[in-house]
Amino acid sequence: MKEGLRQSMAWLHTWTGLVFGWLLFAIFLTGTLSYFKEEINHWSKPEIRSYPLDPVASLDMAQRYLEANAGNASSWFIRLPNDREAALSVSWRDPNGGGRRGFTGKELDAHSGEPVEARESRGGEFFYRFHFQLEMPYPWGRWLSTLCAFIMLLGLVTGIITHKKFFKEFFTFRPGKGQRSWLDGHNAIGVLVLPFHLMISYSSLVLFMYLVMPAGILASYGNPNSYFNDLFGRDETPKVAGVAAPLVPLSGLYAKVQEQLPGARMGYIQVHNPGDQNARVTFTRASADNVAYQRSANWTFDGATGALVAQGAPESAAMMTSFTFAGLHMGNFAGPWLRWLYFVFGIAGTAVIGTGLVMWLGKRQLKHAKSERLPGELRLVEVLNIVSMSGLLLGVAAFFWANRLLPVALEGRADWEVNAFFLAWLLALPHAVLRPGRRAWGEQLALGALAFALLPLLNALTTGQGLNHSIAMGDWAMAGFDLTALGTGLFLAWAASKMLRAPKPAKQRAPRVAKAQAVEAGGC
């Protein structure tokens, strides 16, 4: 009975991993890139320069700009520069339309307060959104990514049950053993980052619980908007009084917040009805200040008098638990070293998925080693493996190349960057179909190595902000991106050399050994 359960879990682990593995690889890779979303944003808009942080001066500049250019707007939004974001961002709801959802936005120079004509780019926001929306209309992409999160959690649990020598396998790695080496690597990486992956998979389900289990919300609230207003402590905005009243200095309100909570960083500042007697100003604490989101970290002031009107409600134990899982998943609280640890663990999760896909195919290829060609179904899996992994890396590289090569003034420029990502990913498909499996792997990895390794040079030639400049200026976000791209290129070059090198002939193995390895592989 015990062996029957283990084999059943192995079957479930294998086939759910195969069917959803290609999409999970993309979700994990783009989610891992999202841990450096702000740094990618900074690299994607090199026109925005970094300066020493001065929240008071930034608020004064933002208020002056908005009063001069958006005095008739119904609301303002301000995001202050921080140690990861260089821009002073302002946006307002334009009564005459404006951009997306009726908003108009500008990025100001944090030193002069003047608008910066930065290139249009979705930057790290694209990878962040793709991670959980898959560039699909709402709510289909979120539903699909949530299903994949459940499959990932299921794969982790079934993997634990399947491998009875769980911790022993963590210390076992036999290089140069073909399929055995892939399994050793899969097991070792999986055990090393298991707590992280369990947390990521479960917390993603918590994040989208309102989508997958909406019955309680609909029964209690009827309208999801009412639920979110209650969840995040949103107060009803007073109507415009129609009586003009100057807005108090925002920097003075910021000082009052600092008196209550010294050193608190602000995520954003929202102003309703600016210039009216019923103006309201809300300061929201940055998510980087806490692991969990806290509604008590909101302050609402009367914009005409400066009096404190309301402060966010404290959290119950249940909500604090839920918000903690959400905070752990997104990692906004993480400092530089912990963020790199998140990144490494995310890459490890991507590798676990990738090695699992390679093992599934590798074992079945052994049965057809003497055949001239693979059966159609195995050839299809081989092509999908290549496209979903090396093809996706080519798409990521193409996105960054497009950011530097597309004309800065091109209309719809951000969309063309995304188009370059999908076009490069799509072109990997016919190449994988037309070329033998190992050659296709090697050639795509080699092209990816070249594309990533040359990114720092491309950045230097097109912006003048190469490694020599960014390191000298202390711009470690820009330098870190270039160094990471270079390291990625070197790793892909090593992987390509392995694939393009002629494989050594497999040694004949005793039937008993082969059977034992098959059992250890857990049915992969």
Image (tube, rainbow, N blue to C red):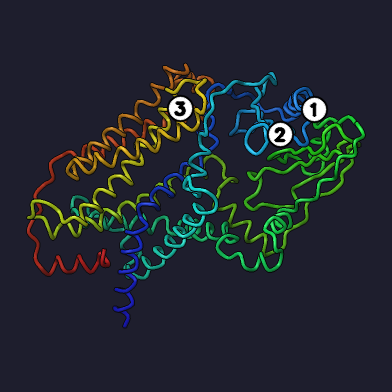
First of labels 1, 2 by sequence position? 1
Query: Which quarter of the rendered picture does the N terminus lie within?
Result: bottom left
Residue of label 3: 403
Taking the spot 36% from the left edge, 65% from the top edge, the residue there is: 159
The location of residue 447, given as percent across then percent down, is: 28, 32
Taking the spot 53% from the left edge, 60% from the top edge, the residue there is: 205
Residue of label 2: 78
Name the residue type under label 3: Asn
| Figure quadrant of residue 484 | top left
First of labels 3, 2 by sequence position? 2
Q: Circle 1 — which element?
A: loop
Taking the spot 80% from the left edge, 50% from the top edge, the residue there is: 236
Disc 1 residue crowd, few under 14, some 14–19, many 20+, Cα 10 Å: some
The location of residue 6, given as percent across then percent down, is: 32, 74
Looking at the rendered structure, which numbered label has been put on residue 302? Answer: none
The location of residue 134, given as percent across then percent down, is: 46, 47
